């Protein structure tokens, strides 16, 4: 194949620790077709996951100890699904569909799949996804698994406990699933906080949330008091900031915050988890509210069971899953910037190619 038949997305510049990312921070360019070595597979990218945590990787200091920064003028990476088009690995054959956490944003890429320093990839169970490959990036990926395990490990949901569950970024990939899972696990009042009337309707009319609050047009604290007359027992926190401060003020004694993400501060030079106002900390302390960082990668051994349960619910129609899809690798930067400003409903995916 000619050199021009392969393309990649590079990090062209950094937005700055307190800057807002733009498409100009990325660059699309032609690149050579990889030549395979022993133990490698040649993969054609099929689809990409676009996630808020990637904003942290645009900084020299990611603010965490479990992810490294992207390097300037090199191919960026993230969750993705691809198909093997050529193999020099005993464990992989042409036509295998694979997924991984760190696939380069490159149309064709050579991946090491053997040896100590191999890039870990997994074969996709075709029966599980039924050729809907991007399910491995959303429902059966980090989003769905984080929603399920976050509630299981940190939510302390009690069946028949008459609990109120609140999720922020509730129309996003993780929050939309978390609210549905909370209901299935026994919460009787599920409230979602999001940023548009369209998203509010999606939560209540399609996903079965009891209430939806538009934080851009409504007083979150006032609406929470209306929607949660018995207070809040479980909060799935995806955003941090003033929205989370308002929720925590409504939480009952011995309740629980599932600290999954803090997207409201990803464009600021703050550690993770970020500091919180004294009034919020006082509420946490006085009411004995747990607020511990939830990192899904600490529970990899539970991933198979989580996927199995999500599959059961999805196939029975008890969970609904939605994607916002951008077409073409060249539109991956636009998809990322849009996702960071709330342009997606459900999981943001980039469809790169077909089998």
Image (cartoon, rainbow, N blue to C red):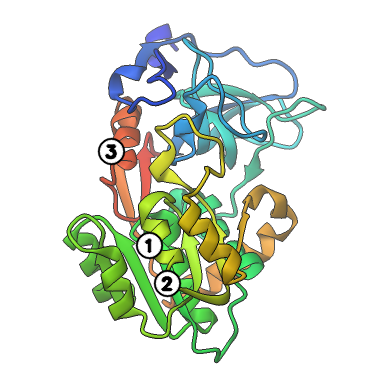
Which residue: 82% across, 27% down?
A: 116
How much space separates mark 2 and mark 1, taking CA atoms?
Answer: 7 Å
Which residue: 41% across, 76% down?
A: 317
Q: Secondary structure at mark 1?
A: helix
How much space separates mark 3 and mark 1, taking CA atoms?
Answer: 26 Å
Looking at this view, is 170 or 103 the one in front? 170
Query: Could you tell me if residue 107 is visible in this image?
Result: yes
Q: Is residue 342 above or below residue 334?
A: below
Cβ atoms at labels 2 and 1 below 8 Å apart:
yes
Among numbered discs 3 and 2, the one appearing first in the sequence? 2
Query: Could you tell me if residue 45 is visible in this image?
Result: no
Q: Tell me the residue that label 3 is attached to.
A: 338
How much space separates mark 3 and mark 2, taking CA atoms?
Answer: 31 Å
On residue 250, which mark appears?
A: 2
Quadrant of the image occupied by residue 311: bottom right
Quadrant of the image occupied by residue 165: bottom left
Q: Secondary structure at mark 3?
A: helix
Find residue 330 and report its horizontal and vertical position in percent: 31, 25
Among numbered discs 3 and 1, the one appearing first in the sequence? 1
Cβ atoms at labels 3 and 1 below 8 Å apart:
no
Q: Is residue 67 above or below residue 140?
A: above
Q: Tell me the residue that label 1 is attached to.
A: 246
Which residue: 48% across, 67% down?
A: 235
Cβ atoms at labels 3 and 2 below 8 Å apart:
no
Looking at this view, is 306 or 6 the one in front? 306
Looking at this view, is 305 or 240 the one in front? 240
Nearer mark to the viewer, of 3 and 2: 2
Find residue 49 and report its horizontal and vertical position in percent: 45, 41
- The crowd level at tag 1 (other Cα within 10 Å; few <14, some 14-19, many 20+) is some
Q: Quadrant of the N terminus?
A: top left
Find residue 351 and report its horizontal and vertical position in percent: 36, 39
Find residue 196 and report its horizontal and vertical position in percent: 20, 57
């Amino acid at each position: 194949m000619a050199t021009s038949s392969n393309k990649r997305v590079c990090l062209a510049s950094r937005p700055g620790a307190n800057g807002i990312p733009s498409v100009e921070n990325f660059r699309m360019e032609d690149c050579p077709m990889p030549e395979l070595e022993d133990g490698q597979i040649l993969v054609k990218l099929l689809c990409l996951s676009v996630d808020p945590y990637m904003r942290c990787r645009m900084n020299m200091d990611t603010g965490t100890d479990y992810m490294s920064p992207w390097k300037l003028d090199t191919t960026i990476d993230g969750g993705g699904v691809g198909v093997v088009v050529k193999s020099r690995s005993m464990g992989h054959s042409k036509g295998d569909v694979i997924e991984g956490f760190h696939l380069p944003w490159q149309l064709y890429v050579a991946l090491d799949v053997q040896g100590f320093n191999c890039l870990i990839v997994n074969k996709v169970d075709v029966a599980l996804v039924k050729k809907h490959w991007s399910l491995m990036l959303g429902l059966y990926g980090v989003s769905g698994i984080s929603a399920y395990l976050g509630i299981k490990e940190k939510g302390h949901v009690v069946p028949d406990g008459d609990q109120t569950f609140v999720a922020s970024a509730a129309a996003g990939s993780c929050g939309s699933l978390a609210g549905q899972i909370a209901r299935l696990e026994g919460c009787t009042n599920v409230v979602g906080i999001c940023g548009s009337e369209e998203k509010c309707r999606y939560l209540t009319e399609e996903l079965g949330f009891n209430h939806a609050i538009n934080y851009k047009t409504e007083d979150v604290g006032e609406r929470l008091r209306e929607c949660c007359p018995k207070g809040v027992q479980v909060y799935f926190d995806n955003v941090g900031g003033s929205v989370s401060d308002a929720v925590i003020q409504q939480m009952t004694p011995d309740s629980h915050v599932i600290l999954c993400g803090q997207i409201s501060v990803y464009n600021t030079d703050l550690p993770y988890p970020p500091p919180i106002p004294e009034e919020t900390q006082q509420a946490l302390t006085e009411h004995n509210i747990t607020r511990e960082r939830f990192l899904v990668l600490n529970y990899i051994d539970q991933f198979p069971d989580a996927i199995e349960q999500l599959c059961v619910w999805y196939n029975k129609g008890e969970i609904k899953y939605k994607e916002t899809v951008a077409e073409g690798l060249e539109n991956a930067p636009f998809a990322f910037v849009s996702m960071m400003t709330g342009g997606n409903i459900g999981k943001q995916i980039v469809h790169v190619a077909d089998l």
